[in-house]
Amino acid sequence: MSWVSKTLSSTLGRKLLMALTGLFLILFLIGHVSGNTLLFKNDGGEAFNIYAKFMTTNPAVKILSYLTYISVIAHVVYSIILTRVNKAARPVPYASSQASTNSAWNSRNMGVLGTIILIFLVVHLQGFWYQMHWGNLPTVQYNGEEYKDLYTIVKFAFQQEWLVALYVISMAFLGFHLSHGFASAFQTLGLNHVKYSPAIKKVGLAFSIIVPALFASMPLYIYFMN
Amino acid sequence: MNLTLNIWRQKNNTDKGGFREYKVTDVSKDMSFLEMLDVLNEQLAEKGEDPVHFDHDCREGICGMCSLYINGKPHGPLQTTTCQLHMRSFNDGETITIEPWRAKAFPVMKDLVVDRSAFDRIIQAGGYVSVNTGGVPDANEIPIPKRVADEAFDAATCIGCGACVAACKNASAMLFTSAKISQLALLPQGQVERKERAEKMVAQMDAEGFGACTNTGACEAECPKGISISNIARMNREYFSAVVSSENV
Ligand code: HEM
Ligand code: SF4
Ligand code: FES
């Protein structure tokens, strides 16, 4: 084995990949949530549709989106590998356990939280991302240029109570995942410092509340406005 | 105090093992947990039964030999060693469940005794420094800032008990290994083998079958010596910078 593959198959190397892909997905979430706030604009979806076309055609965004796909896949693959290693390290479980007295629930259940996020991702990508790329979407004209009308798809999707509920609940789980994951990724990278760690923890907590709450408010807003 | 003990009994390394219930009566609140088990073992010996095997040595909280997963926590309800845990931490009439440390890398040898030599092998892989032989060096020849000396000393207080592994949901040995890497990486004497040490000790830790770190913080919360998980971050830095810069291809 070369030193690179040896490192990346060590427990620390695998965790490094989890942390780097997790942090990249956090950056992605910032971009995604900022762009989607255009859904709140009362212009019949014009700004949102123009933005959606830009996101699927701009070459720089294309590179970023491929990095995002790779990050999601690597994050999931390594979470499965690590979970298996971790389970194998304790073949006989304890008969009585008071784990709640020494650690937070979300930190012990990152795999469960991640799996729920993954299920959500499949539904979410199938509903909008797949439609935007390969679906048969209605089109609209702004200033003589043709755009796919993703806004209308979004608007109709969020008339369904079950879908709105799924989005809101999934975002709560994402928040739990991030309220451990954000600060944990810095610790994994070795960035633990008396000056900065308390700030990283605070920013992580704020991020894990604000970003999922913003995402959750979008289906709720569309549902109640229509 | 009168207590009911629910104790893991296992004849040997290959036996399946199981829990057995015992009653102990007239236990003093001032007894240590191990003394309470001594009382039980005297009762068993009088009846001609096999006493409950458990690890212990100094009974002063300094050797790291005592273990026991008591009522769902390593070393019981307090953040201390089992030899320093007293029966006043329990209530009269209570049922106490006692299990061995559970980890693939710590096989159960008999009853509550586990084999922790995996820790020794991690130390052997790189937890040492080169020392020049010859004349006795001056005591203060090598300047070390007090803050650094204190930090290295804090890491060096790890007694190798394994409570961190026992507490971790992944049976990870990161807190132990990181303390042992830190105590040497921080000091001038530890620089010669610095990179090699991080690479080899991490590799040995993995080879022993310990899990990875999810940063739950359970180890730090249960460590009788209060070893901080900032040592794990240091180990990660040491390891990552070692693998990218060492000549070990
Ligand atoms: C937008 C989506 C996601 C983001 C932003 C995200 C972010 C993160 C971050 C930052 C960490 C901490 C890494 C570390 O401790 O060093 C983490 C850990 C983890 N993630 Fe995710 N994640 C996402 C989706 C998922 C999915 C879909 C899964 C899959 C099944 C998953 C499973 C896990 C697991 C199991 C861990 C803990 C690994 C361990 O330490 O043992 N995550 N995530
Ligand atoms: S780090 Fe703490 S819990 Fe782990 S072996 Fe050392 S003293 Fe015991
Ligand atoms: S017997 Fe030595 S620390 Fe408990």
Image (cartoon, coloured by chain):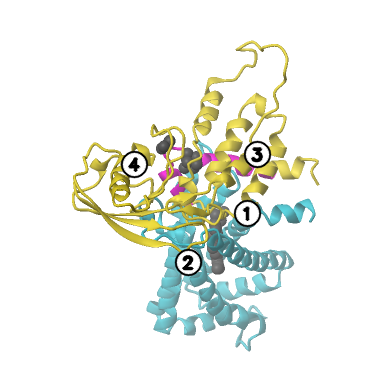
Chain colours: A cyan, B yellow
Judge if badges 4 and 2 mark residues of a common chain: no
| Whether label 3 touches label 1, CB < 8 Å | no
* Badge 2 amino acid: Leu
* Badge 1 amino acid: Thr
Label 4 CB, ligand 3: below 8 Å?
A: yes
Mark 3 vs mark 2, CA separation in Å:
39 Å
User: Which residue, given by chain and number where applicable, does mark 3 sit on?
Assistant: B124
Q: Chain of mark 1?
A: A
N-term-proximal mark, 3 vs 4: 4
Q: Position of residue B74 (x, y in %)?
A: 40, 48
| Whether label 1 touches label 4, CB < 8 Å | no
Number of the front mark, 4 or 2: 4
User: Which residue, given by chain and number where applicable, does mark 2 sit on?
Assistant: A113
SS state under label 1: helix
Q: Chain of mark 3?
A: B
* Badge 4 amino acid: Leu
Q: Chain of mark 2?
A: A
Task: Answer with the quarter of the image where residue B18 lies.
Answer: bottom left
Region of the chain picked out in magenta, as a range:
B216-240
Q: Is residue B230 magenta?
A: yes
Q: Chain of mark 4?
A: B
Q: Position of residue B71 (x, y in %)?
A: 33, 53
